[in-house]
Amino acid sequence: MRVVLGVSGGIAAYKACSVLRLLTEAGHEVIVVPTAAALRFVGAPTWEALSGRPVSSEVWDDVPLVPHVRLGQEADLVLVAPATADLLARAAHGLADDLLTSTLLTARCPVVLAPAMHTEMWTHPATGANVALLRERGVHVVEPASGRLTGADTGPGRLPDPEEIVAAALAAVTPAATGDDAGRSAADDLAGRHVVVTAGGTREPLDPVRYLGNRSSGKQGYAVAAEAARRGARVSLVGANVSLETPAGCDLVPVQTALELQRAVDRLVDGGGVDAVVMAAAVADFRPAHYAESKIKKTHGEGDDSAPTIELVRNPDILAGLVERRAGAASPFLVGFAAETGDGTGDVLALARAKLERKGCDLLVANEVGDGRTFGQDTTTAHLLRPGTEEVRTVGPGDKALVAAAIWDHAAPLLR
Ligand code: CTP
């Protein structure tokens, strides 16, 4: 496999030597593209000796070979380690002022960025927004480790161990490119796949302090995402108002409203290469028609004790939109969830069957909710329904991880 290893200018650049070593020893062809600042930390002769190839930071070397376009076009993987705050910002905004950022713009292969910087820079809202934007576009941004930084200070921002970076980078690439498609087990049956999982519950703002929301905690969606990552998938996790820790190996795209969730999912799917979308999020079907810029007050005037009426408008049905846009064989496998309480018109299974037909997805996971069941709990009972058969697979009562495993057991062999 042909790997472009970008190195940007941080003290952790020295650790990229080990990353390079691990990649070349695994038989990959590695072209190192350091930034000018990276070369102040580790010089070109080190990269050239370790990779066995000349290195350049500039678009002005070897111009007849058009390296600023060719390197990205021909790569099977672009990995940047360490990725500094400045590199993340330039990548997020599409700048192309040196060879590495030009390569990032021309690459159509998986791109993996391993950030390293001081905690203050990592937790700054500007860096957070840049990371969110990159993840929305399907770039895999590895979570930095916590620990000792350059000086005596500690905190999140440390470059993960080279072994971990290489594992995350290889997991982002299709098995065809790594030539290791054979002998897959349940433990890695999603290797090389890119899946999108939505989780949590949307909040539809009424005014700066109030919203319409729901009881979803995100536990089921997070369990689905964690299981996919464990099985080797690249996971984009679109989390709506979830306060759980992001599972290892997942790229979190935080959202609040149904419209934001739709935009995040559409951008990921439109970027191409998504193999499955699991819609575990509880998406509000309606949102307030008007957002009050200032807090809605209890009384509008002396003696006025009337209550306001909240007008609602419909939100788009995101899952139905994905079903409509199916493009033949390239369409991702679509999993819907149904949270049902049962009502006068039928029991949970009958309602779920009707929903599966209405939605047209490839798998529907029906949960019984209400009376303290499912929402916010660690355990659940779920029914897995498929189109074209009356057969139902019931999982639980048990941990939400069990349901997650059942979903991927079913979906993994059916991915295109
Ligand atoms: N869903 C969606 N967009 C919406 C509402 C729901 O994509 N606006 C998705 C959910 O993520 C879930 C599935 O559709 O995977 C079913 O959600 P649910 O709320 O149970 O169903 P609704 O379509 O809203 O139907 P109803 O309210 O009639 O039960």
Image: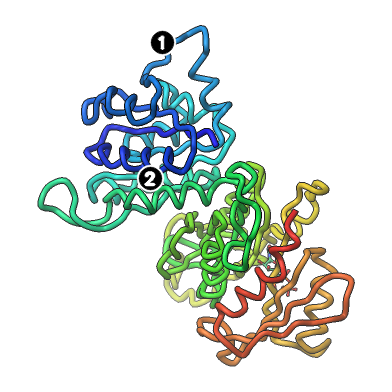
* Amino acid type, callout 1: Trp
Q: Earlier in the sequence, mark 2 or mark 1?
A: 1
In the rendered structure, find residue 114 and report the number of the disc placed on it.
Answer: 2
> Which residue shows up at 65% across the image and 52% down it?
181
Q: Quadrant of ligand 1?
A: bottom right
Q: Which residue is mark 1?
A: 60
> Which residue shows up at 47% across the image and 47% down it?
169
Callout 1: SS: loop
In this view, 306 is above or below 10: below
> Which residue shows up at 55% across the image and 21% down it?
70
Q: Position of residue 351 (x, y in %)?
A: 80, 81
Q: Is residue 313 visible?
A: yes
Mark 2 C-beta closer than 8 Å to ligand 1: no
Which residue lies most toward the left here?
152
Q: Residues within 10 Å of mark 2 (few under 14, many from 20)?
A: many
In this view, 1 is above or below 300: above
Callout 2: SS: strand
Q: Position of residue 193 (x, y in %)?
A: 62, 53
